[in-house]
Image (spheres, rainbow, N blue to C red):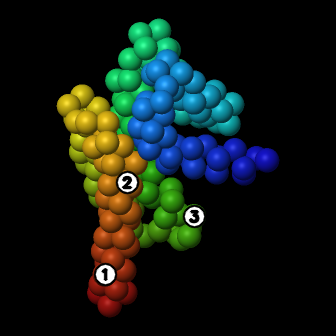
Amino acid sequence: MKLLRPVLLGLVSLAYPPLVYLGLGHFEPRWMALPLAGMAVVRAVATREKTWLAAAAGALVLAAASMLGNHALPLKLYPVLVNAVLLTVFATSLAYPPSVIERLARLREKNLPPSGVAYTRRVTQVWCGFFVLNGGIALGTALWASGATWALYNGLISYGLMGLLFAAEWVVRQRVRAQHAHG
């Protein structure tokens, strides 16, 4: 059950944009806010980390705004909130090392050399840039794009871009490792 909650939360989060888009065609926004509120409560129960508790609180505020005003915009702002939270986590780790990527790297390689620490710091900076850009596009689609465009970007394209960044970083990392092994 402990592992099931984060997996289910992740799946619901991935499905959130298309579910909201499809749901708004059949239900008022106030009713579509209920799944967002449910995700927020599950996230709050599943975590002890202050950042994710703040994210859950933010999601509850968005859900409440949608319920009270019966507006779809707060529902569409959830991906913006997620990017802002991830940006906060990654940027804070740059100010208070080790960086997020260094922590992940140390799971595989306990004795990370100084060059590896510098590399992981740079990758964390790249992810910060990604979250700024992705969050900005998510905000733009929420404010000015059609519901279909919002769902397409936030439910598919943004995840594709994230996967592309993961893949590009993996390729770069292999080259950096090879250079250090021969250097």
- Residue type at tag 3: Leu
The picture quadrant where one finds residue 88 is top left
Q: In which quadrant of the rendered view does residue 120 lie?
A: bottom left
Residue position marked by numbered label 2 in the rendering? 156
- Amino acid type, label 1: Arg
| Label located before the other in sequence (2 or 1) | 2
Residue at the extreme bottom of the image, as rendered: 182
List the residue tagged with mark 1: 175
Q: Secondary structure at mark 2?
A: helix
Please report whichever mark, 3 or 1, sits nearer to the chain's N-terminal start: 3
The alpha-carbon separation of the residues under discs 2 and 3 comes to 29 Å
Mark sitting earlier along the chain (2/3): 3
Label 2 and label 1: CA atoms lie apart by 29 Å
Q: Which mark is residue 107?
A: 3
- Under mark 2, the amino acid is Leu
Q: Residue at x 24, y 41 (%)?
A: 137
Q: Residue at x 32, y 63 (%)?
A: 165
Estimate how packed mark 2 is, as few (under 14), some (14 to 19) or many (20 or more) residues with alpha carbons within 10 Å: some
The percent coordinates of residue 121 (x first, y second) are 34, 56
Q: Left or right? Give the position of 159 relative to 10.
A: left
